[in-house]
Image: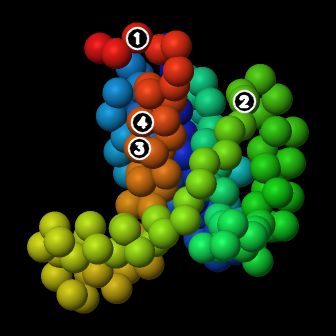
């Protein structure tokens, strides 16, 4: 069983999170510059087995697509071309930045460190991945453990 890797795509920075090999726990991985994402993912996939990518799906509160969605769709196209054997799923990421900021604040991180936007991107990717795992594990027909 390979890892699931979540991607919180932004035009400047990309937050990444991954599961353990058993796909039980979502953990922050890193933040990379948007233009370095494919190189990072290639190197990561060369050393770790990745079973699936989960890319955030930004929506506004009224369910309309966010303004960054067209850039994300282009990124997903590149991702599928670069890694044709790895499926790509999308996961709603509404409010993840807000939730990430609150989680960082509530964890006791110093105010100066809370301003690190890369940390917010990593935590947002982790929230996206955790949401995906919960939805997948609660799917109809799946036995409750």
Q: Nearer the viewer, mark 1 or mark 4?
A: 1
Q: Are marks 3 and 2 in contact (CB under 8 Å)?
A: no
- Disc with the residue nearer the chain's start (4 vs 2): 2
- Quadrant location of the C terminus? top left
Give 109 or 31, whichever is nearer the viewer: 109
Give 79 or 89, whichever is nearer the viewer: 89
Q: Which residue is mark 1?
A: 143
Q: Is residue 24 left or right of residue 85?
A: left
Q: Which residue is mark 3?
A: 130
Q: Residue furthest left?
A: 108
Residue density around tag 4, few if under 14, some if 14–19, many if 20 or more, within 10 Å: few
Residue density around tag 1, few if under 14, some if 14–19, many if 20 or more, within 10 Å: few
**In the picture shown, does residue 134 fall above or below 6?**
above
Residue density around tag 3, few if under 14, some if 14–19, many if 20 or more, within 10 Å: many
* Residue at the spot 54% in from the left edge and 46% down from the top edge: 6
- Disc with the residue nearer the chain's start (3 vs 2): 2
Give 63 or 73, whichever is nearer the viewer: 63
> Dot 1 lies on which element?
loop
Q: Are marks 1 and 4 in contact (CB under 8 Å)?
A: no
Q: CA distance from mark 1 to mark 3?
A: 19 Å
Quadrant of residue 73 in the image?
bottom right
Coordinates of residue 134 in the picture (x, y in percent): 42, 36
Q: Is residue 29 visible?
A: no
Q: CA distance from mark 4 to mark 2?
A: 18 Å
* Residue at the spot 37% in from the left edge and 68% down from the top edge: 99
- Disc with the residue nearer the chain's start (1 vs 4): 4
Q: Nearer the viewer, mark 4 or mark 3?
A: 4
Q: Nearer the viewer, mark 1 or mark 3?
A: 1
Q: Which residue is mark 2?
A: 87
């Amino acid at each position: 069983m390979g890892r699931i890797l979540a991607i919180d795509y932004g035009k400047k920075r990309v937050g990444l999170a991954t599961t353990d090999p058993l796909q039980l726990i979502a953990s922050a991985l890193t933040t990379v510059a948007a233009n370095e994402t494919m190189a990072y993912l290639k190197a990561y996939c060369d050393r770790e087995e990745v079973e699936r990518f989960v890319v955030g799906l930004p929506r506004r509160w009224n369910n309309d697509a966010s303004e960054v969605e067209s850039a994300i769709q282009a990124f997903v196209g590149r991702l599928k071309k670069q890694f044709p054997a790895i499926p790509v799923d999308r996961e709603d990421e509404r409010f993840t930045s807000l939730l990430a900021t609150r989680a960082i604040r509530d964890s006791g991180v110093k105010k100066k460190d809370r301003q690190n936007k890369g940390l917010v991107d990593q935590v947002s990717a982790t929230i996206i991945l955790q949401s995906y795992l919960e939805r997948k594990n609660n799917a109809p027909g799946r036995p409750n453990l």
